[in-house]
Amino acid sequence: MIKSMEGEIAKALPSVITPERFTRITLSALSTNPKLSECSANSFLGAMMTAAQLGVEPNTPLGQAYLIPYRNHGRLECQFQLGYKGLIDLAYRSGEVKMIQAHTVYENDDFTYELGLEPKLHHIPAKSDRGAPIFFYAVFHTKDDGYGFEVMSIEDVQTHAQKYSKSYGNGPWQTNFEEMAKKTVLKRVLKYAPLKSDFVRAISTDETIKDTISDDMFAEPDVTIVDSETGEVVAASEGGET
C-alpha cells in the first residue's frame, strides 16, 4: 500500500525530501516498530500522508515527527505526533521567525527570569554536574526584531501534559520527557508569535489519528476517541517513538 501511494507522496512532499527517501523512512519505521504494522491501514496511511504534507521525517534520529501505535477504543491505530525539532522547522519555514530555540534548565545552572513591562531571561549552563532538570524555556525572535519567551517548571509541564495531552504517560512522554517538555513550551510561546494561519493549521495535526486521505490532510477529521471514564487514549503496550 505504501508503494502504491508513491505518486501521492511525491505530490505532497516539499522539495527537501525525495519520495524515494520518504518511502524508505516509512518502511524502516514499520520494520523497527512491528506494532505499527498491526495498526489499521487507513490510520497508518493517514499519519504517513500528514507527515509528507508537513515535510517532516517520521521516526528518524532527526526527531521531527513520530508515527505511534495507539489503542483507540480497542482498535490499534496510528497516531501522528510532531517532535519539538519538527515544530522548530515549521516555525522557520513560516518565514516570520529568524531565531527560535528551546532549552532545559538544570538545578546547578545560573538561571533567572522576570516578567512585567521589561521582561528578562538569563541562563548560563553549569560547566559540569548540572543536576536534574527544573525548568524548560523557549524563545523566539521575529524578522522585524520582535521577540518573546516562555518558561515552565517541570511541574508546570507535567500538569499541562496530564490535562491536555492525549498521550501523556505513554510513548515519547516516557522515553524522551525532555523533548516533549520542550515541545510543550515551544507550542505555548508560539501562541504569541506573529505566525501565519498555515503554521497554525500545521501544528493542529499534532497528536491526531486520521483514517481518511486527501490533498489537504489538515482538513481531515481527527478520529481519536477519548475514553469517557479516564479522558485519555490508551496506548499500545509497545507504542512509543522508535
Image (cartoon, rainbow, N blue to C red):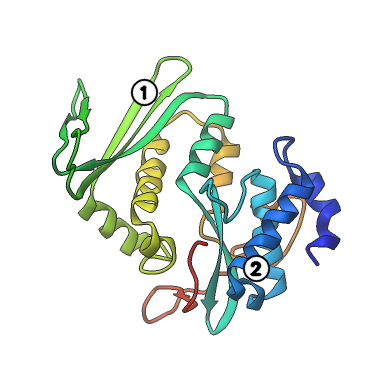
Whether residue 142 sits left or right of residue 16 in the image: it is: left
Query: What's the residue at 20%, 20% (across, down)?
Result: 118
Label 1, label 2: how far apart the Cα atoms are: 43 Å
Whether residue 56 sits left or right of residue 18 in the image: it is: left
Query: What's the residue at 21%, 55% (across, down)?
Result: 155
Classify mark 2: residues with Cα within 10 Å, few (<14), some (14-19) or many (20+): few
x and y, in percent, of residue 213 in the image: 74, 60
Q: Disc 1 or 2, which lies upstream in sequence?
A: 2
On residue 93, the disc is: none
Task: Write down the residue under mark 2.
Answer: 31
Q: How many marks?
A: 2
Q: Nearer the viewer, mark 1 or mark 2?
A: 2
Task: Write down the residue under mark 1.
Answer: 147
Q: Residue furthest top?
A: 144
x and y, in percent, of residue 23 in the image: 75, 55
Which quadrant of the figure has residue 197? top right
Amino acid type of the residue that numbered disc 1 sits on in the rendered structure: Tyr
Whether residue 173 sits left or right of residue 18 in the image: it is: left
Task: State which quarter of the image contains the N terminus.
Answer: bottom right
Query: What's the residue at 41%, 15% (across, down)?
Result: 145
Q: Is residue 43 above or below residue 185?
A: below
Which quadrant of the figure has residue 160? bottom left
Query: What's the residue at 42%, 80% (across, down)?
Result: 228
x and y, in percent, of residue 159 in the image: 26, 59
Out of 26 and 114, give the one closest to the viewer.
Answer: 26
Q: Is residue 56 above or below residue 149?
A: below
Q: Is residue 55 above or below residue 214?
A: above
Amino acid type of the residue that numbered disc 2 sits on in the rendered structure: Ser
Whether residue 201 sits left or right of residue 83 in the image: it is: right
